Image (cartoon, helix red, strand yellow):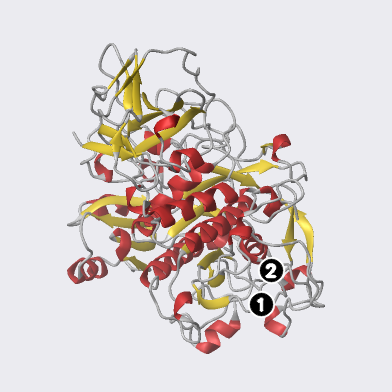
Amino acid sequence: MDSRSIAVALVLILLSPLAGSIAAPSSNPEHTPLDSGGLQLIEEGLTTEVPDQEPIWWDSSLNWWEHTSLDSDRNGIHDSLQLESGPVNVGLSYFRDVSIMDKIKLEELGFDIQIELPVVDALLLGDVNASQIWQLAELDGVVMVERYGSLVFYGDVQTPAVKAKNSSEYPIGAWDFGVTGKGINIAMVDTGVDNEHPGLKTKFVAGYDAVCFVHSDPQCILAGGREDDGSFDPDDGNQHGTACMGMASATGIEADGSQSDFYGSAPDAGLVDVRIGTDVGAGPFENYLLEQEFYESAMNGLQWIIDHRDDAWPGVEEESYGIDIISLSWGITSHENGGSDGTDMHSRILDEAMELGVAVSNAAGNDGEDNDGLSGMSASSLSITVASTDDQNTVNRSDDTIAGYSSRGPRKDNGDGNPLNELIPEISAPGTNIIQAEGCVSSGGCNNFLGGDASQNTYTGRGSGTSYAAPAVTGIVALIWEANENLTPLQIKEVLKHTSESRGEASAPEVDPYWNREFGYGMVDALEAVELAIFLRDSGQTPLIEPTLQNHRLNFSSGEVINLTGHAWGQEGSIDRVEYRIDGGEWMETTYSITPSQVGALTPFFWHILLDPNKLPSGN
């Protein structure tokens, strides 16, 4: 059992309460000084001993293929594949690195390797006969024969409503702290981006065409393929990618040079344009004959991002090197009942990106209230999955509701015994009736392949979907990272969760007291998130943010006694103590509510900080 401590510090005063306040102390409690100076106090019902906590009940050492729900009979083959006959598209996952001998063996058996995915120890084979899956499962090192999924693209007031830009409703926005996403690169993985659009000009840093091998563009064939060094700049023949990048990072500039209010959340962020649609921009929802190629192009694009995440792009300043964020406004449907459980290779590749330092902002999906689980991508255990709200076309957040089309959680149980990683989505943002940056194709007669571009286009047409909620959060992640470059992707996810505006009742209170299946942990708040990131930076407390240690302020009151109360619990082990300090002083331990018995795993216990205001240093 892991035993850890939580540093409370002044950060708790900045965190918005995520639950109703508990009762303030009685007006005349019996207070006893705990230290020689008489600053910290204790009262009846409190103790200096942290409550005894039960250990977690799941075994976190299990490998994913040992517990996945996608292979219920544990024969190393996705269950849905065993019901198929004829051609099916499959990939192989190995428990180790894929070797040259593994590839030679496949070629000897007559299988073609379409894509290599070293980040998840996998190979994509494409079309095989269903009768061959048993042979593939017996190959040395193979732990799972996986079925391809099918790609689906999820398709003015948004930026002030998330409190990125200030407004009359919210006079201070995150931008007022001097952060606009400068130096942060967003990999928009979509149908391409027409960055000639006046609101997206000068953003292009690097690009990659992951679908050139889908021979729908004669220019690609004649060129002998595309460059894979980041120098190729894909265009958007569909509109989806341009719209999504606009919501993340548009400057609001019009074709005549005037300034509109159609900003993205991070107007100074850079663009790494990774096209996974076809060369003519058609999404898979338009041409299911190319299902195999779409899956392969998506995985190809994600592998390219991870391989090039630290590249020094030519022609840009050093601060614009690499790739910081992956923005995904599409999903991969599962062939299994109940959706994905997050163990398929297209979910695992996103987990790897998060752990390698690339944040992932991911659309939850548009399957509505009665959705049959979450799709692959949305089911990733570690990425930031975004639900969509309806802001009623007002900046004021009080009238916001969950969008009817937004997919609800939780994710399908992956069988590892840990209920926490099923709590998806994590965050919500406006995604309904959103004004879009227009790509070339939005203008009648415009064609990128015939010399057309989006340089004269504007921001018109409204769209809805978690496709449009996710880029807003992508931009906010860029703001947070500019504010505090030392945060990790998983820490940024915690900052977003802790500073979100809680909505709805807890859907799984026995697991987490805050998560709601519609809103996640709440509606994103760019202002609060950036403020917290700056505080952590300036106070030197960034290293103290441990995502598995949960700690929330519940109540603050002052009078004869200052009383700060909260609760805490561990998600991977017990908590050894909760500490606080004042203005960089010595760390001191809180007091705790007396509990009659051992506190259950994942069950919060209450801590208290009682201070004599007369003993505080001058100025506090």
Q: Which residue lies at the image location 56% right of the left edge and 71% below the top edge?
A: 271
In this image, 75 relative to 174: left or right?
left
Residue closer to the observer: 173 or 611: 611
Q: Which residue lies at the image location 42% right of the left edge and 48% below the top edge?
A: 380
Q: Is label 1 in a helix, a strand or a loop?
A: loop
Amino acid at pointer 1? Lys
For disc 1, the neighbor class at 10 Å (few under 14, some 14 to 19, many from 20) is some
Quick one: label 1 or label 2, which is nearer the N terminus? Answer: 1
Q: Is label 2 in a helix, a strand or a loop?
A: loop
Check the image and report above or below for 50 versus 259: above
Residue 113 location (% of width, % of height): 33, 68
Looking at the rendering, which quadrant does residue 452 occupy? bottom right
For disc 2, the neighbor class at 10 Å (few under 14, some 14 to 19, many from 20) is many
Q: Which residue lies at the image location 64% right of the left edge and 49% below the top edge?
A: 162
Residue closer to the observer: 521 or 418: 521
Residue 446, visible in the rendered structure:
yes
In this image, 603 relative to 105: left or right?
right
User: Contact (CB < 8 A) between labels 1 and 2?
Assistant: yes
Residue closer to the observer: 554 or 500: 554
Residue 374, visible in the rendered structure:
no
Q: Which residue is mark 2?
A: 251
Give the label, 1 or 2, closer to the camera.
2
Residue 312 location (% of width, % of height): 41, 80
Residue 520 location (% of width, % of height): 53, 37
Looking at the rendering, which quadrant does residue 179 occupy? bottom right
Q: Which residue is mark 1?
A: 201
Check the image and report above or below for 70 versus 433: above
**Quadrant, the N terminus:** top left
Q: Whole-Å distance between the Cαs marked 1 and 2?
A: 9 Å
Residue closer to the observer: 187 or 88: 187
Check the image and report above or below for 195 versus 594: below
Amino acid at pointer 2? Thr
